[in-house]
Amino acid sequence: MTETSQHDAELMTLDEPVLETIKRDLKMIGAKLKFVFMPTAKSEDTIAELRKWDLWGPLLFCLILSVVLSVSASEDQGSTVFACVFVVVWVGAFIVTLNVQLLGGKVPNFQSVCVLGYCICPLVLAAVLGMLWNNIFFKLALVAAGYAWAMRAPVVFMAQLVSEEKKALAVFPVGLFYLVIAWMIVII
Amino acid sequence: MYPPPPGSSHGGDAGGYGQQQQSGMPNMAGFQNMANLAENPMLQSVAKENFLQMQAQLTNKYMPGASSFWNSLRYYFHVDNRYVIRKLGLLIFPWRHRQWARIRFNDESMNNDPSAPRTIDFAPPIGDVNAPDLYLPTMASITYILFIGLLKGTTKSFNPDVLQNTFSTCTLVLMVEIGAMKGSLYSLPGGADVKPALLDMVAFAGYKYVLVALNLFIGISLGRTVYNVVMFYLCLCMAFFVYRTMEQAVPAPAYEDTGHKRRLYFLVACAALQFLTIFFLGFTRDLGETTFPGFPSMPAFGADDEYADDEADV
């Protein structure tokens, strides 16, 4: 009897209240954000957590970033900016993943895209906070801090994928990728 | 439908995707087994393997060359930090380099099986600084595109099309250059060993992006005059590099006299082509005249645009 009720519970997630689903997904996103904000905490949980990749977090951050930037762009460029940011984030993440795979790191596509997408979070925060005050130096400082923070987690992630003498080669495209995003936040 | 994996103990499994199996499934027990599929880690890994295998099969069916292309691409990305640093030094100071020949080893297995696909018998980049790689050109071209965007941003002439236009320009220049080199290779006497592999030539031509990106960085930070001077120097470097590299890649013919002259003309033409392409790629009207710091004044970042719009609305 318990088996049937257990498998009933498994198959019935379609019937649960929407709030439950959203809460569960948010918890999942929150668990991964722990790695982004504290990348040196090398507990087994965080590493195992990362293996279960999901694309909700990256989508959420990408959308927030695109909306924030297109709102603060000039009138006629709003939609172009949205499209540009969206494409740059996803295509850039895939290109960086491709590079790591070509360098010999054995990581599934989507896991790497997931980690890169989550690590955009500090830059998204910087973009949102940058909307408060339109001073160029304030934005520069925020974005610089966000960039430095965003680079910490992927370095740790890449370090465990490729050997020591290829680490800089795997990290360089990640640096470029976040540099593009940071620079777009500054100029738009 | 692929066959179920060998050695699996479940009676009703079908690879973890919840699909019903036609034959011999007991009713309630089998259904419960399938409900627990998602939780069984061993089954998950087996399912993943099967999925990847099926994916590889499908790829081979619809894109016949894909996996061998991927494998040959792996050769060009077999690099490490040491190689990249040495190669960068080679590109910027090519006259200091003495030994330009690539290391090759004899692949004994080729003699046993003539129908096996032709493997590259040069040492991979990780063991030979003269071997071409595709990591540096790729990263350098992406850096170049981003620097162009940055440059346009400092003069307020940036829009998202700039990145795409630069990318198309780079691709076009590469294709034209490779086409010209390949075309002239046909005019040289000699067999298949005269012609270097296509990806080799893409790599050799792509190294100029390292120099152009570096040049652009120097131009952005130090101004237009320094930019022009360094561009001339880097053109010389690239011409020398391509001359020496192609000299190794296209071996001298054994006994023909005309072959020697034609080869020489080809090498000089390759070197001269570098001047043209580097100048074309590096030509920009957006550089400031100032020296250090090279960024123009703050309004270029668009900070004043907000207020300009508000006033225009009145």
Image (cartoon, rainbow, N blue to C red):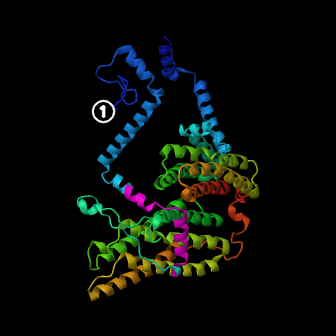
Q: Position of residue A184 (x, y in %)?
A: 63, 55
Dot 1 amino acid type: Pro
- The chain identifier of the residue carrying mark 1 reads B
Query: Which residue is label 1 attached to?
Result: B3
**How many numbered discs, if any?**
1
Q: Residue at x 74, y 53 (%)?
A: A134
Judged left or right of residue B188, residue B169 is right
Magenta-colored stretch includes residue B80 = yes
Principal SS element in the magenta part?
helix
As helix, strand or loop, the secondary structure at mark 1 comes to loop
Magenta-colored stretch includes residue B209 = no
Residue A115 visible: yes
* Crowd rating for badge 1 (residues with CA inside 10 Å; few <14, some 14–19, many 20+): few
Name the quadrant containing residue B42. Answer: top left
Name the quadrant containing residue A58. Answer: top right
Residue B66 vs residue A168, the one in the foreground = A168
Q: Position of residue B1 (x, y in %)?
A: 30, 33
- Quadrant where the C terminus of chain B sits is bottom right
Q: Residue at x 50, y 60 (%)?
A: B164
Q: Position of residue A9 (x, y in %)?
A: 52, 19
**In the image, which residues are magenta?**
B71-95
